[in-house]
Image (spheres, rainbow, N blue to C red):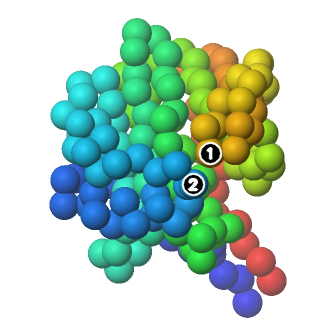
Amino acid sequence: MATVTHSVVIEPMAEADIHEVSIIEHLCYSVPWHKSAYETELHNRSAYYVVARENRAVVGYGGMWVVMDECHLTTLAVLPDMRRRGIGRQLLSTLLRESIRRGACRATLEVREMNTSAQRLYHAYGFREQAVRRSYYTDNQENALVMWAEDIHSPEYSQLLHALLLPVYSE
């Protein structure tokens, strides 16, 4: 029997979501953002933040800034027990599509050097390591990889985004 991967609803983050986002933030990051950072970001004209919902509960979130023609992915997190179900892909695809709609031609992000699962996700979306920020993370002095995806406004990249969201079937 064929089954479709887990599906959630992705929608813009609202102030009412910040409490649940903060809980996920504390579960996923050793140096979490304060709630006030999200309150500020929701009023930042360059920013765009989304949540992933399952049965009305927030199970993941992500955010970005678009400045001129560049997208900077600022955060992406999924509840630990909800990972490996395609939610991160849905969040990332939504953010990248919105950045393209806002005129971005390329995208960047920082990721922990030891976070290989996140790096695999970003590689699938065409991100490549371009630099290392030494001792970037203050909790343990871990390096950050600076990754870029180029030509995200191209028809080829649009095809990649579409392909990455196709349902996965298993027997």
Residue at the limit of the structure toward the bottom, as seen here: 1
Mark linked to residue 25? none
Observer-nearest of 6 and 171? 6
Task: Assess whether mark 1 and mark 2 are in contact (beta carbons under 8 angstroms).
Answer: yes
Residue receiving disc 2: 30
Q: Which quarter of the image is occupied by the C terminus? A: bottom right
| Residue 131 at x, y percent in the picture | 76, 18
Residue at 40% x, 74% y is 54
| Residue 156 at x, y percent in the picture | 67, 26
Residue at 30% x, 44% y is 38
Q: Distance between the residues labelled 2 and 1?
A: 7 Å
Q: In the structure shown, which secondary structural element does the residue marked by tag 1 occupy?
A: loop
Observer-nearest of 151 and 169? 151
| Residue 138 at x, y percent in the picture | 61, 38
| Residue 17 at x, y percent in the picture | 26, 60
Compared with 48, 169 (above or below) is: below
Compared with 166, 140 (above or below) is: above
Mark linked to residue 139? 1
Q: Which of marks 2 and 1 is in front?
A: 1
Q: Quadrant of residue 112 in the image?
A: top right
37 on left or right of 137: left
Residue at 41% x, 61% y is 52
Within 10 Å of disc 2 (Cα), the crowding (few <14, some 14-19, many 20+) is: few
Q: Can residue 10 be seen in this view?
A: no
